[in-house]
Amino acid sequence: MTTRRTRKWLYVKERKAKFAARQTTRAEILHVEEEG
């Protein structure tokens, strides 16, 4: 039970990290395009 909960928490944490990374990458690209 504890293992499953931890696994789900890690899965959610990983998804949030990937989503945040994707958002920052998109923001950086837009920022560069605006400057250029």
Image: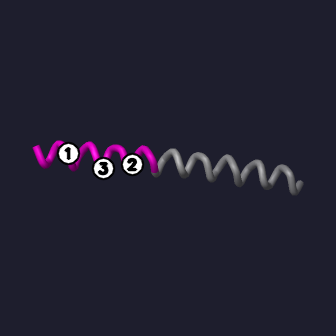
Q: Is residue 9 magenta?
A: yes
Single out the residue that lies furthest toward the right: 36
Which amino acid type corresponds to the residue marked 2 in the rendered image? Glu
Q: Residue at x 80, y 55 (%)?
A: 32
Instruction: Say which quarter of the image contains residue 11.
Output: top left
Q: Which label was assigned to residue 14?
A: 2
Residue range (magenta): 1-16
Residue 27 placement (x, y as % from top left): 70, 50
Q: Which label was assigned to residue 32?
A: none
Q: Is residue 7 magenta?
A: yes
What residue sits right under mark 1 in the picture?
5
Could you tell me which secondary element the residue under label 1 belongs to? helix
Q: Residue at x 73, y 50 (%)?
A: 29
Which amino acid type corresponds to the residue marked 1 in the rendered image? Arg
The answer to whether 23 appears left or right of 36 in the picture is left
Q: Which label was assigned to residue 10?
A: 3
Q: Nearer the viewer, residue 13 or 35?
A: 13
Chain-order first, disc 2 or disc 1: 1
Which amino acid type corresponds to the residue marked 3 in the rendered image? Leu
Marks 3/2: CA–CA distance: 6 Å
